[in-house]
Amino acid sequence: MLKLFHAGHEIELSPDSMIIVKRASEQDYETLANEDLKVEFDGECLYIHSPASKMHENVVFNLLAIFKTFLAQNSWSRMES
């Protein structure tokens, strides 16, 4: 769950939520954007995506490990030919 705090209130959002902030500035974008939060800015609005779930992160990690192994094995076989 994503928790937002504003003016003494707390809101919990499900993992498939998106927050849209209208009339945002580039400064707003720079304040919110970091490696843990996916934020897009189109010049008018901020689009804040909910973070990936743990299950999603595990699937991506496992796929990357499979690709890494595959590429390492195939790179060596090409170099030997």
Image (cartoon, rainbow, N blue to C red):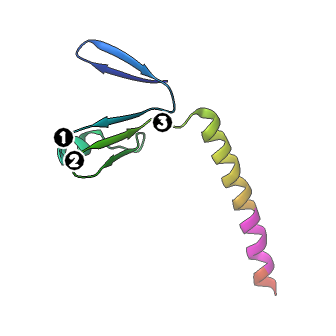
Q: Which mark is residue 23?
A: 1
Q: Which mark is residue 51?
A: 3
Residue at the image point whose x is 32% and y is 43% from the top: 33
CB within 8 Å, label 3 to label 1: no
* Three-letter residue code for mark 3: Pro
Give the spatial CA distance, label 2 vs label 1: 5 Å
Circle 1 — which element?
Answer: loop
CB within 8 Å, label 2 to label 1: yes
* Three-letter residue code for mark 1: Arg
Query: The C terminus lies in which quarter of the figure?
Result: bottom right
* Three-letter residue code for mark 2: Glu
Which residue is the extreme one toward the bottom?
81
The magenta stretch spans residue 74: yes
Q: Name which quarter of the figure residue 70 lies in.
A: bottom right
Q: In front: 45, or 31?
A: 45
Which secondary structure class fits the magenta region best? helix
Q: Circle 2 sits on which residue?
A: 44
The magenta stretch spans residue 17: no
Q: Where does the image place residue 14, in percent across and percent down from the top left?
A: 50, 25
For the magenta stretch, what is the residue range? 70-77
Depth check, mark 3 against mark 2: the one in front is 2
Task: Name the side, left or right, on which 31 lies relative to 77.
Answer: left
Task: Name the side, left or right, on which 26 lies relative to 58.
Answer: left
Q: Where does the image place residue 1, in percent across and percent down from the top left?
A: 50, 24
Task: Name the side, left or right, on which 10 lies relative to 44.
Answer: right
Give the spatial CA distance, label 3 vs label 1: 23 Å
Counting residues from the start of the chain, the first of labels 2 and 1 encountered is: 1
